[in-house]
Structure formats: structure tokens, C-alpha cells
Amino acid sequence: MSAGAPILYSFRRCPYAMRARLALHAAGIAVEHREILLRDKPQAMLDASPKGTVPVLVLPAGRVLVIGNHAGQLPFDGGMVQTALMLEADPPRVARAMGEYWIPRIPFFNVLATRGGALVGTPENCVQLLEQEEAIMVFPEGQRGFVKTYKQRYQLQTFGLGFMRLALETDTPIVPIGIVGGEEQSPGLANIRSLGRLVGSPAFPITVTFPWLGPAGFIPLPVKYYIEFGEPLRRVG
């Protein structure tokens, strides 16, 4: 078992804890397994989860900014990165996404983003999470990157530099990532910004499936993702 492995607090007769152990085993994630007595719960578990119900999975700390390219009309690429960090990183990490300021204005998607752990990408939100040793995922291209036509696929757009200032301010390492596959999941035909403004968004993508198929047009095409994680970079200045 690697140093800094996740800690799983469990009770052998709890069906929810059993499912957690089975899921971790199936995913090949090594954990430090700690069985507890319900009448004598360890303080370390209660510190991590004051509710005190099992299972409790405590992930290792360590602030990091995960920075990558963005595409696909909807942020499924972000979900794929989060999944890779949870299932394949050693040790596993849960990444919180920094989203555009207008996401909370869009019905339905604002709820999905919140439940997925995303926050509006203000410097204050990001600094607060980094100070809590969180892993933060940022796509500096913003909507310029993920709302593109298929003709513009894999053409990087201008990166905002706010993440660099935050990395310097908080002494946070940057892990660069490259994502291939997002451009093909929902090929864009056009971006009608005037329609987007009606729902509070600076963009309104027209794709090969949306709006022609209605809500079903949001479902991505079956594509294979390739995600490359670079070595951590630390900058001073």
C-alpha cells in the first residue's frame, strides 16, 4: 500500500459499508481499512464526518491546481478528469471544478453543477478551497474553449492567467493535462450568442444533435477519451 493511501472507516455488518468496500475493490483502489465499533467511534472519523455514519472515506490532502484544455459544448470532459483522478490517481483525489460566473443562471444545469461539486470560479472561492488542501480543476479557456465549432476542433483558445496568480499566491503546484475526445462528443455547427443571452449565457451552441433532438440532444456521442497528466509544476515569482 502506498504512503498516504485513503482511509476507509467501516463496520462489518453495515450494508452501505459493504458496498463501499466492494466498489473500491472492483476499482482497484488500495485503502487503509479501519473497522470501528459503533458504540466507540474514533475521534479521527468524527473529525472527518461529524455525522458519524459509516462508511467514511478520508482522502489524502495536498493542494493542487489541475489545468487543461476544454471542449465539447457541455463539460463532460471535466467529469472524465474527475473520474480519472478518483479511480486512477495514486492516491485518489476528488477534484472540485471552477465554473463560469453565468452557470448558476442556467436552469437545470446550475443544479447539476452544484451537485457535482463545482463552484463559481472567483479568486476568493479558489483560494478558500486551496487553503483547505483541495484539488481544484480549472479550464482557463473558459467558454471560448468548450463552445467551438467542429472546424475549430483542437485549436487552443487564449488561456486566462488568473490560475497562475493564484498558484503563486498560495504556493500551489500546477498539474497540466491534455484531453483528447471532448471535441468529438458533440460536434458543434454554430454558436448563436443572441439566443444564449436569453437564458443568461454568453453562448448557445448548435450541434449535430441539439436542438434537433430536443433534450436528448444534450447526450454526448459515444467517444473514447484520452487524458494525459503531466508532472507537477511549481512557479515562484
Image (cartoon, grey):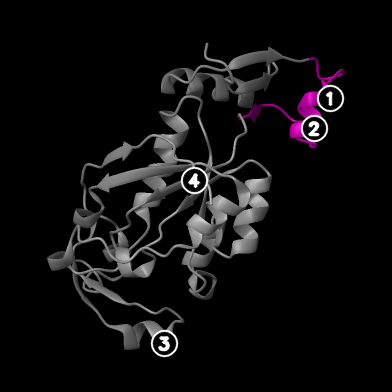
Tags 1 and 2 touching, CB below 8 Å: yes
Q: CA distance from mark 2 to mark 4?
A: 33 Å
Q: Give the class, few, some or many, for how many residues have Cα within 10 Å of label 4's Cα (few <14, many ≥20).
A: few
Q: Residue at x 61, y 15 (%)?
A: 32
What is the x, y in percent for residue 115? Answer: 56, 54
Q: Return the mark for residue 198.
A: 3
Q: Residue at x 59, y 23 (%)?
A: 6
Q: Which residues are magenta?
A: 37-59
Residue at 51% in and 16% down: 30
For mark 4, what is the residue?
A: 235
Residue at numbered disc 2:
47
User: Mark 2 is on which residue type?
Assistant: Asp
The answer to whether mark 2 and mark 4 are in CB contact below 8 A is no
Q: Residue flagged by tag 3: what amino acid is it?
A: Leu
Residue 7 or 229: which is nearer the viewer?
229
Residue at the limit of the structure toward the top, as seen here:
1
Q: Position of residue 17 (x, y in %)?
A: 63, 23
Crowding at dot 2, Cα within 10 Å, few <14 / some 14-19 / many 20+, comes out as few
Residue that label 1 marks: 43
> In the rendering, at what x and y percent does residue 229 appear?
35, 37
Question: How many other residues sit within 10 Å of disc 3, few (<14), some (14-19) or many (≥20)?
Answer: few
- Going from N to C along the chain, the mark reached first, 2 or 3, is 2
What label sits on residue 25 in the rendered view?
none
Reply yes or no: does residue 42 show up in magenta.
yes
Q: Which numbered disc, 1 or 4, marks the residue closer to the eye?
A: 4
Considering the numbered disc 1 on the image, is that residue within a helix, a strand or a loop?
A: helix
Give the amino acid type for the residue marked by disc 4 in the picture: Arg
The residue lying at 54 percent from left, 70 percent from top is 104
